[in-house]
Image (spheres, grey):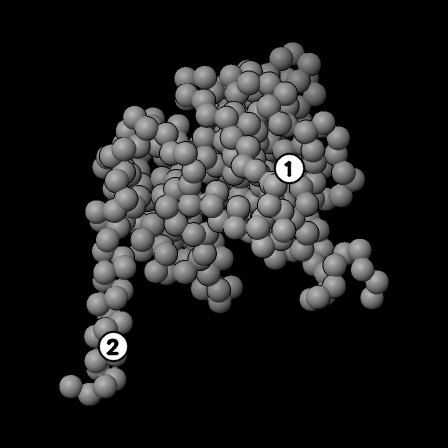
């Protein structure tokens, strides 16, 4: 056998072993009645902090059962992240097709069309890197999650480990940090803003003044009203402008430039959140312009 063939066979065997192990490992059955202490994504964030010398920085998380989370938050998250959650078996093939088309047009792997189940698999066990091999592992884990856990448990895990800010994980800590309330007390407007920042909670803040957050949360809230999830009071009804759109999906309803803004935010420079726990807003649009390589935003040219 020629050396090149030997190398190819070895690489193929390594690939099969590396991806195939996720059919058996980790033990997803433990998640039926056991909450994970720390996720792979949390460990990734901690590694980033150590590289930056932030050794004292800690993960802030407060675990809450789904029964103690406002229905406003649950509905807002589903509308914003995975509107077909209760119908699909882990994968939204139409969303994946749209994402693939956008990736081909952009000539890079930028959007994944991931469901809540896929996001949970990635956050629990994998790195945030966007590459085909990681997506295969994610697909295997998603299939296992859907066949092992109930939809309710998947949703409970998701809202408790999702990143909602710099060091802020889970809706228990997010509700307290941004609004000073328990998850059960979140209003529809607060829930809409929390759901709006999930695509990139490091750059965008629920209490910030970002145009992206404002527009996306307004769209989520409008869909909640249209579906009867939220019943506006008299003053709000009288202040509403006529709604002539037929849009009932955040995925197809968000203007393209807003989606691009969220998906590309990681490459736009500073990771400083635009808002804070006190509720004060920075007077920026929430997207920090990139600085030249090797030059920080406070350095002289």
- The residue that disc 2 covers is 8
Alpha carbon separation for disc pair 1 and 2: 47 Å
Q: In this view, does 18 lie to the left or right of 129?
A: left
Q: Is residue 119 visible?
A: no
Q: Is residue 193 visible?
A: yes
Q: Is residue 244 left or right of residue 67?
A: right
Residue 214 placement: quadrant = top right
Q: Residue at x 34, y 60 (%)?
A: 133
Q: Position of residue 198 (x, y in %)?
A: 53, 39
Q: Which residue is drawn at 46% across and 25% down?
A: 63
Q: Where the N terminus falls, by quadrant?
A: bottom left
Q: Which residue is drawn at 67% across and 41% down?
A: 273
Q: Where the C terminus falls, by quadrant?
A: bottom right
In the structure shown, which secondary structural element does the residue marked by tag 2 occupy? helix
In the foreground, 57 or 152: 57
Q: Residue at x 41, y 21 (%)?
A: 65
* Chain-order first, disc 1 or disc 2: 2
Q: Where is residue 190 in the image (x, y as percent from the top left)?
A: 60, 25
Q: In this view, does 92 lie to the left or right of 227?
A: left
The extreme front residue here reads 55
Q: Where is residue 276 in the image (x, y as percent from the top left)?
A: 69, 33
In the foreground, 232 or 123: 123
Count up the numbered dots: 2
Q: How crowded is mark 1: few (under 14 residues within 10 Å), some or many (20 or more)?
A: many
Question: Would you say the residues marked 1 and 2 are in contact, meaning their CB atoms lie under 8 Å apart?
Answer: no
Q: Residue 222 carries which label?
A: none
- Residue 231 position (above or below residue 201): above
The extreme top residue here reads 234
In the foreground, 92 or 247: 92
- Residue 123 position (above or below residue 132): above
Q: Which of marks 1 and 2 is in front?
A: 2
Q: Which mark is residue 205?
A: 1
């Amino acid at each position: 056998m020629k050396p090149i063939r030997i190398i190819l066979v070895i690489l193929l065997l390594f690939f099969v072993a590396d991806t195939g192990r996720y059919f058996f490992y980790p033990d997803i059955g433990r998640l039926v009645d056991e909450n994970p202490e720390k996720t792979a994504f949390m460990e990734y964030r901690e590694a980033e902090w150590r590289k930056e010398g932030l050794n004292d920085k800690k993960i802030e998380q407060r675990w809450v059962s789904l029964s103690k989370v406002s229905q406003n938050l649950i509905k807002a998250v589903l509308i914003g992240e995975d509107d077909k959650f209760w119908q699909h078996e882990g994968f939204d093939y139409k969303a994946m097709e749209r994402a693939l088309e956008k990736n081909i047009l952009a000539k890079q792997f930028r959007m994944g069309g991931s469901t809540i189940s896929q996001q949970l698999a990635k956050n629990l066990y994998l790195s945030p890197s966007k590459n085909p091999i990681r997506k295969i592992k994610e697909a295997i884990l998603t299939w296992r999650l859907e066949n092992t856990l109930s939809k309710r448990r998947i949703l409970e895990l998701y809202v408790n480990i999702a990143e909602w800010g710099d060091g802020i994980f889970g809706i228990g800590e997010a509700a307290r940090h941004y609004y000073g309330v328990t998850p059960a007390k979140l209003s529809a407007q607060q829930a809409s803003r929390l759901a709006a920042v999930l695509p990139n909670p490091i750059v965008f803040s629920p209490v910030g003044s970002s145009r992206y957050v404002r527009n996306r949360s307004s769209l989520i809230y409008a869909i909640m009203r249209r579906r009867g999830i939220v019943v506006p009071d008299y003053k709000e009804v009288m202040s509403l402008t006529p709604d002539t759109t037929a849009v009932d999906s955040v995925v197809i309803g968000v203007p393209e430039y807003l989606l691009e803004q969220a998906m590309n935010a990681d490459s736009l420079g500073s990771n400083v959140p635009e808002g804070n726990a006190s509720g004060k807003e920075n007077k920026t649009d929430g997207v920090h312009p990139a600085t030249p390589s090797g030059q920080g935003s406070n350095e002289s040219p």
